[in-house]
Image: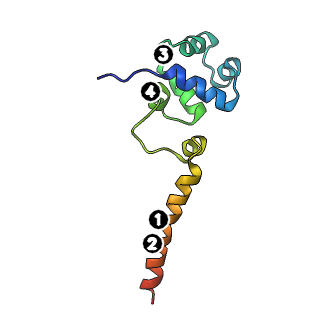
């Protein structure tokens, strides 16, 4: 079963978060304005180089950019941009503290 292509939605959302215009994104990524316009209108990407350039610019995977999700764990940058960093950090700290206490009690 093929995944639904969500590139146009993801791209618009990422651009909005960064406050980027299509012109500025094109300039920063070297993706031609006509190609970017087509992608934002829901067109299928013609060159993977363009998708790769956009994914690298936004610090995400090509799979996430194309489909809105991927199977790998999120990076710290992605967690921070998804506004869940604080919750993630709390979980990491809570996991670290019991291990620290175990280590301290084993030293006695």
What distance separates the C-alpha of mark 1 from that of mark 3?
Answer: 42 Å
In-front residue for pair 10/54: 10
- Label ID, residue 67: 4
How many circles with numbers are drawn on the protein? 4
Ranked by sequence position, the earlier of labels 1 and 3 is 3
Ranked by sequence position, the earlier of labels 3 and 4 is 3
Tell us which disc is closer to us: 1 or 3: 1
- Residue identified by numbered label 2: 99
Quadrant in which residue 2 is drawn:
top left
Give me the residue at 54% from left, 30% from top. 55
Tell us which disc is closer to us: 3 or 2: 2
Q: Are marks 4 and 2 in contact (CB under 8 Å)?
A: no
Q: Residues within 10 Å of mark 1 (few under 14, many from 20)?
A: few
Residue 17: x %, y % from top left? 65, 32
Residue 8: x %, y % from top left? 53, 19
- Residue identified by numbered label 1: 95
Residue 93 as seen in the image, left or right of residue 21: left
- Label ID, residue 45: 3
Ranked by sequence position, the earlier of labels 4 and 2 is 4
Ranked by sequence position, the earlier of labels 3 and 2 is 3
Give me the residue at 48% from left, 34% from top. 61
């Amino acid at each position: 079963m093929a995944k639904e292509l969500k590139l146009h939605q993801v791209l618009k959302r990422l651009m909005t978060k960064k406050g980027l215009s299509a012109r500025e994104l094109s300039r920063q990524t070297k993706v031609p304005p006509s190609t970017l316009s087509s992608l934002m209108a829901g067109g299928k990407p013609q060159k993977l180089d363009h998708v790769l350039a956009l994914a690298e610019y936004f610090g995400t995977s090509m799979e996430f950019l194309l489909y809105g999700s991927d199977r790998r764990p999120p990076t710290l940058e992605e967690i921070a941009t998804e506004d869940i960093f604080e919750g993630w950090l709390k979980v990491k700290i809570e996991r670290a503290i019991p291990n620290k206490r175990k280590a301290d009690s084993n030293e006695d």
